[in-house]
Amino acid sequence: MPDNVTSLFRSTAAHSPSMAALTRESDGAGPVDFCIPCNPYFPTPAMFEEMAARLRDIITYYPSSADTITAELCGLLQLPPQCVAMGNGSTELITWIDHLLVRESLAVPVPTFGRWTDQPMETGKRVDMFPLQESSGFALDLAQYAEFIRARGTRVAVICNPNNPDGGFLHKHAVVQFMDAMADLDLVVIDESFLEFADAENEPSVVQEAMLRPNVIVLRSLGKNFGLHGIRFGYLVANPALAGRVRSMLPKWNLNSFAEHVVFMLKEHGAEYAQSLHQVRRDRMDMSGQLSSLPGLTVYPSQGNFLFVRLPVGAEGTVVRDRLLTEHRILVRECGNKIGSSSRFLRLVVRPQVDVRRLVTGLEQVLYGTSRRGAAVPEQATGTAYSSGTAAVDRLVTQTNGAGTRGLAQAAGAGMPLPAVASAPAVGPGGGMPVPAAAGLPQPEPQPVPQEAPRPQPAPQPVPQPVPVPQPAPQPVSVPQPQQLPQPAAYPEPAPPPAPAAPPLAPAAAFASPAPAPAPAPMQVPPATGPTPPGVPARGGLTAAQVRGTDGLSMAPATGWPGAQSWPDAAGMGQAAG
């Protein structure tokens, strides 16, 4: 594959170039795809042959109305049609959710699917980004996230379960508890686009709970699960009023004839679909083991059909991506343009073992120098100071959380503790995610620490005692001078809060399935205190400009990844697929 094909990546903002574009720029044969997260085992070859035989009719005639196709899908999933809206891909539904239901602000953990950050900003909304910490394996702590939402005064909350790109998973009882704690928000969205591939729980979906709540939407994908991204179809589940509001705005023929044909085929191929999910889960375990054996490569736990990996110290993801493509015809997803990530991370789609062996061989040659062009990792690793999500943050920093965040980045650091060295959690032995020793790679010699390293110690600097700043509760917050911020004035060190009045919500136990033992302690959510002014960090939260290299939030310990033997159907509810 010619070197100039990698120039296609330079023209993309938040995504990779399409497979069609890569194929056109090469010699006509596409690469082995570890980038597009779809099911490699479904549809079956027989299903593709059937579609090929009917291709002329499929592309010649109009499809049925969306109501007809939705009714067929709901019959398969045992869902009431009035609670479902089908779209031309989940991104169409995200667009309508933003236009119809997001009034002023939206909170989302990062890194995540790019449309959840970009779409609201394109329509002038404030996006409050909650950074997932590398030192905690990118696990989402829902209690910390809830506190962040309250402090920012956000009106819409999004959770992706499993999350893209890291595959982090939240158990159903925890998601239901969060939904009820956020019942006073305008909207809570649970994006379950990759939940079909999870095996940590028998019935992980919250679609049934969403239909009973006034402000919850569950978003689900069909293209990813069925291995048919090009058809563009997905659906949402909500109470009849919410679902009907979105459905009323969709065009009558927003679903194409291919989508209709596949939906009507599914009832005859439920067994093959279930087997395909089972095989993806087995491949995920095998692929994780093979990648974990590579020196210096860190593989994070995933419940999606992809794995999030951190490259060895010194490796640059764009170099690794381009060389895998040009030298080995392997396409991978480099994550430097995802907010909250960096080019040290790749997202690798789960594929059959024969393809994984080819990937491992390519990575060995590119990373460790067994190819003619040498290694992508320097022999002497001098540290891990890399910018986390720099490209993506710089792209959006002037559009996020109000104007002037670039100038406030340093002053905003006083709102919460930041590490002295941003890279410390990446390799710290106590950080929860140690980097395995790279066999064959010389370990870095101790380097003299620059004099600015002990900067956080205030003792050597005889600075006059700062004048206490009164707390102007409802008044607009003015931009303070950096030297006046040795201690946060507007957001002091949190004292034990008075017992917050519990919001007048129905208890989660009234709707949720029985929680697995031992049951977690109830989520403590602070009372809403009103929105934080744009560009000013909330207590316990960050602006977008602070996303890179932070380690200010302590996460709850992970709950483990049990290997359940059963799997959900297309609705995630354990119904018979055939």
Image: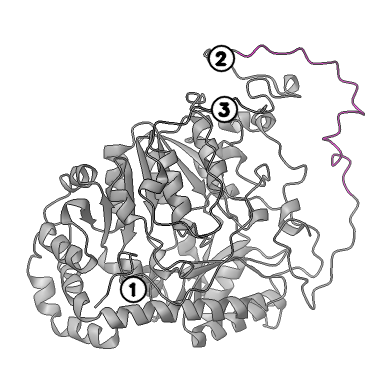
Residue extent of the magenta highlight: 449-471
> Which of 64 and 570 lies nearest the eye of the viewer?
570
Between residue 164 and residue 355, name the one nearer to us.
164
Identified at 65% across, 19% down, the residue is 480
Under mark 2, the amino acid is: Ala
At 32% across and 40% down in the image, what residue appears?
Answer: 215
Q: Position of residue 349 (x, y in %)?
A: 48, 72
Q: What residue is shown with label 2?
A: 473
User: Badge 3 is on which residue?
Assistant: 499
First in sequence, mark 3 or 1: give its number: 1
> What residue does disc 1 label?
227
Which secondary structure, mark 1? loop
Q: State the colouring used for the structure image.
A: one colour
Residue type, label 3: Ala
Whether the residues at callouts 1 and 2 have beta carbons within 8 Å, the answer is no
- Does the image show residue 111? yes
Q: CA distance from mark 3 to mark 1?
A: 50 Å
- Which of disc 2 and disc 1 is earlier in sequence? 1
Q: Is residue 512 magenta?
A: no
Residue 458 forms part of the magenta stretch: yes
105 left or right of 10? left
Q: Is residue 363 left or right of residue 34?
A: right
Q: Quadrant of residue 280?
A: bottom left
Q: CA distance from mark 2 to mark 3?
A: 20 Å
Name the main secondary structure of what is drawn in magenta.
Answer: loop
